Image: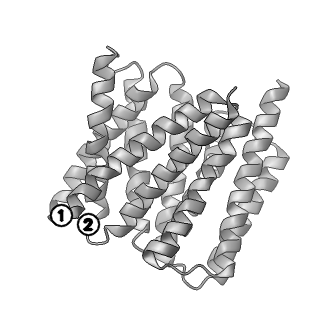
Amino acid sequence: MDVKSAIKFMLISTLAFACMNSIVKYLVNISAYQIVFFRSISSLFFTFPYLLKNKIPLLGNNKKLMIFRGLVGVTSMTLYFMSTKYLPIGTAISLRYMAPIFAAIFAVFLLKEKVKIWQWFFFAIAFAGVIILKGFDTQINNYGLLLIFGAAIFSGMVYVLLSKIGKGDHPVVVVNYFMVIATIVGGVLSINHWVNPVGKEWYLLFSLGVFGYFGQVYMTKAFQTASTTQVAPLKYIEVIFTVLFGIFIFAEIYTIWSLLGIALIILGLVLNVLYKSKLQNKK
């Protein structure tokens, strides 16, 4: 295992996703539906050529599940993009990372998986962070909070659907389904909310797919290069990059309470990742 390369790959991935988050925040005049459309259609310029070049069947095997995953995924993406209009970008991305908690709850009922007591304790730490954010940070907008929790819940459902799909289909086929569905849904919903991009907004909109694609590619490379225990906690560096961008680019102000809340959310989720990896290594 090449840990140094894995760390480098994950840093590139988290930086790419943080850049994508910041562009979404910057495009305040563009509707969330339109951002979904451009984020998705620009990714298709990477996924389709890859599948065709490697002669991978476009339709795959688990068609119904992948369509459902696409619909659930585009719902999560739309709610997340909408929430950035009302919340500091660092806060939004931190709360969206609550998805693994909802995924664990869904897995209990849908996949009959068991969640250990320690995991519930780590989830409680993360939820304590949410309570601090909501209870002590007066900047938190209630509507934005509702949107981002919806995004996290649907993102948690995506985790479960990906588990159901398993290795029966190539990862790029699954992503391609998601991007095609998101392009269609985002395009249709954009019709009544369309704003003609001006100047550099065109470049920024199409760059969403570029940053999103390379974020996914380098994250995959990182997980392929080193163990989950070594790599998974590093993905939360995205929050740090995003908060820094929020401060220096958008002049967002994070109170001590908001930073404490974000720290507790990340702490609880990282501890859960490490604990799950430890359990898997014992098997």
What residue appears at the point 34 percent right and 32 percent down from the top-left corner? Answer: 176
Residue 144 in sight in this render: yes
Picture coordinates of residue 55 (x, y %)? 32, 14
For numbered disc 1, what is the local secondary structure?
Answer: loop
What residue appears at the point 68 percent right and 71 percent down from the top-left corner? Answer: 261
Q: Is residue 118 left or right of residue 168?
A: right
- Would you identify the image quadrant in which residue 60 lies? top left
Picture coordinates of residue 191 (x, y %)? 16, 58
Vertical order, 135 against 266 (above or below) = below
What residue appears at the point 49 percent right and 18 percent down from the top-left corner? Answer: 168
Mark 2 and mark 1 in contact? Answer it, CB < 8 Å: yes
Mark 2 or mark 1: whose residue is earlier in sequence:
2
Q: Amino acid at mark 1?
A: Pro
For numbered disc 2, what is the local secondary structure?
Answer: loop
Residue at numbered disc 2:
30
Residue 88 in sight in this render: no
Residue at numbered disc 1:
197
- Would you identify the image quadrant in which residue 42 lies? top left
